[in-house]
């Protein structure tokens, strides 16, 4: 089955800096790679996703890159703000199957 | 967007009792739903895949007799934690697939077993 590794587990940045979180996956059949932001006690919120037919996707301050050959994908947050502080999870799956999550990254943005 | 409703959001129960958690897709039909468990400061761990009209598929290490899953309709899946113990205390969250790629999550259920 799929296995997703996520690094780093914690990340502290200054407001305005960029943050990068990286994930690797094991199943070459996976074709969907979403990123979620989760606040304590709440459901995960989808912030951006990418499908395997695309190498990069951007939405304002957030971007995701995918390298299918190396089986890794990354989340990039630019101009970080204190409200970006949260736990971020990457995930991977094939369409229709369960999402398999990475272990999460706790991002702290200090002002 | 699609909505998945999970109930209850919080429940406290005594050891040895059973607790039922409901997961409903409100505006779409979900032939498949997924149940996850999340311990504090940990990731979401897949427990089982719930299939409408058939038996659930459990992940390795998850006791099917302890975590009973029923998916009797295209809009409702239930997870029953039987004979609950304090170590079952966790955040349980369901997910439904309304479209091939996107997953929709319920609000989650905080279970505390005392």
Image (cartoon, rainbow, N blue to C red):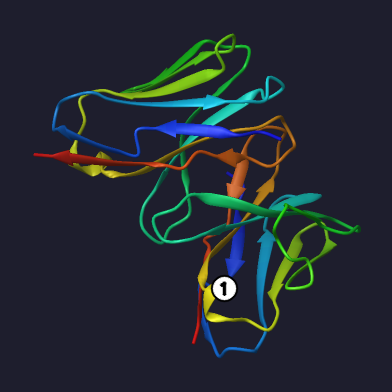
- Residue B29 shows in the view: no
Q: Is residue B41 left or right of residue B18?
A: left
Question: Which of the two residues, B80 or B43, is positioned nearer the viewer here?
Answer: B43
* Local secondary structure at mark 1: helix
* Residue visible at 55% across and 33% down in the picture: A4
Question: Which of the two residues, A94 or B4, is positioned nearer the viewer here?
Answer: A94
Residue farthest toward the left in the current orientation of the protein: A111
Q: Position of residue B102 (x, y in %)?
A: 62, 36
* Residue visible at 73% across and 38% down in the picture: A97
* Residue visible at 67% across and 64% down in the picture: B23
Residue farthest toward the front in the current orientation of the protein: B61
* Residue visible at 57% across and 44% down in the picture: B1
In the image, residue A1 above or below residue A56: below
Question: Which of the two residues, B2 or A86, is positioned nearer the viewer here?
Answer: A86
Residue farthest toward the right in the current orientation of the protein: B54
Q: Residue B41's quadrant in the figure? A: bottom left
Q: Residue A78's quadrant in the figure? A: top left
Q: Is residue B42 left or right of residue B105?
A: left
Q: Position of residue B95 (x, y in %)?
A: 64, 51
* Total numbered badges shown on the rendered structure: 1
Q: Residue A17's quadrant in the figure? A: top left
Q: Position of residue A34 (x, y in %)?
A: 53, 32
Q: Position of residue A36 (x, y in %)?
A: 46, 40
- Residue A51 shows in the view: yes
Chain ID of residue with mark 1:
B
Question: Which of the two residues, B92 or A11, is positioned nearer the viewer here?
Answer: A11
- Which residue has dot 1 on it? B88
Mark 1 is surrounded, within 10 Å at the Cα level, by few (under 14), some (14 to 19) or many (20 or more) other residues, namely: some
């Amino acid at each position: 089955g799929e296995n997703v590794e996520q690094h780093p587990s914690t990340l502290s940045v200054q407001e305005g800096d960029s943050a990068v979180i990286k994930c690797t996956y094991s199943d070459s059949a996976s074709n969907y790679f979403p990123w979620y932001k989760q606040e304590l006690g709440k459901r995960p919120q989808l912030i951006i996703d990418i499908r395997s037919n695309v190498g990069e996707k951007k939405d304002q301050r957030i971007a995701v890159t995918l390298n299918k050959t190396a089986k890794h994908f990354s989340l990039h947050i630019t101009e970080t703000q204190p409200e970006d502080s949260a736990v971020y999870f990457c995930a991977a799956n094939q369409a229709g199957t369960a999402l398999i999550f990475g272990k999460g990254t706790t991002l702290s943005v200090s002002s | 967007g699609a909505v998945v409703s999970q109930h209850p959001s919080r429940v406290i129960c005594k050891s040895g009792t059973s607790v039922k958690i409901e997961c409903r897709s409100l505006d779409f039909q979900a032939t498949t739903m997924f149940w996850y468990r999340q311990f504090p400061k940990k990731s979401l761990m897949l427990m089982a895949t719930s299939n409408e009209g058939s038996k659930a598929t459990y992940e390795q290490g998850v006791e099917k007799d302890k975590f009973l899953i029923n998916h009797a309709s295209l809009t409702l899946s239930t997870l029953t934690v039987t004979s609950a113990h304090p170590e079952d205390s966790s955040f349980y969250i369901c997910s439904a697939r309304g479209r091939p790629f996107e997953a929709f999550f319920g609000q989650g259920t905080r279970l505390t077993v005392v």
